[in-house]
Image (cartoon, rainbow, N blue to C red):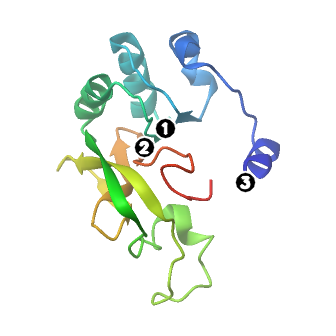
Amino acid sequence: LYKNLITQYRTDVIHEKALSTVALADYQAAVFVGVTDISTGLAEKLDGWIRSGGGLLNFASANMNAAALNAFYQKAGVGRFNQVVRYDQPVGFAQPDLGNLLFQTVFARIKANAEFDGAAINRIYDFTPLDQGVQNVIIRDRNNRVVLHEARVGGGRIFTCTLYPTLDWSDFPI
């Protein structure tokens, strides 16, 4: 998957500590994986960029500063990360919203009643979406916890994955 992504799009890997120096206007989208902290300055910069049409896909981090991320998310009207939940037995996905724009071309030929082969989740952040603006829970786990959430923020979007993409959290194929 990563090889296809890298060959289809220009990608830059930027260390978390250098994010505040990046000219976000040079990018249409950003993917945060393992970002543990969002400073107030970076939060303001991200908020303006997203409201102007930027897109953020944020994967929860195992060691993130939830208070800082929650301040950013709540100002944007998106939601709130709560505690990490550890499952005794892996939990799968519930049926996702296959009509979502993310899936429309991928699942165009699948019928509405088709089974979705999801991940085996071991750990997940409990996430509470705010009841503001245009928001959509795209995927939940079978315990009804949010796995993938989409929120429109101004002219842009924030996608939130509540799984840290490592095998001790899930076998989610990313």
- The kind of residue on which mark 1 rests is Leu
Q: Looking at the rendered structure, which numbered label has been put on residue 1?
A: 3
Residue name at image x 23 percent, y 33 percent? 74
Residue 171, how many percent across, how many down? 56, 59
Which badge, 3 or 1, is on the more N-terminal residue? 3
CA gap, disc 2 and disc 1 = 6 Å
Do tag 2 and tag 1 residues touch (Cβ < 8 Å)? yes
Which badge, 2 or 3, is on the more N-terminal residue? 3
Q: Which residue is mark 2?
A: 157
Which badge, 2 or 1, is on the more N-terminal residue? 1
Residue 77, how many percent across, how many down? 24, 38
- The kind of residue on which mark 2 rests is Arg
Q: Looking at the rendered structure, which numbered label has been put on residue 4?
A: none
- Label 3 crowd (10 A; few <14 / some 14-19 / many >=20): few
- Label 1 crowd (10 A; few <14 / some 14-19 / many >=20): many
| Residue at the extreme left | 131
Residue name at image x 80 percent, y 48 percent? 3
Residue name at image x 59 percent, y 76 percent? 107
CA gap, disc 3 and disc 1 = 18 Å
Tell which tag, 2 or 1, sits nearer the viewer: 1
CA gap, disc 2 and disc 3 = 22 Å
- The kind of residue on which mark 3 rests is Leu
What is the secondary structure assignment of the residue under circle 2? strand
What is the secondary structure assignment of the residue under circle 3? loop
- Label 2 crowd (10 A; few <14 / some 14-19 / many >=20): many
What is the secondary structure assignment of the residue under circle 1? strand
| Residue at the extreme right | 7
Q: Which residue is mark 1?
A: 56
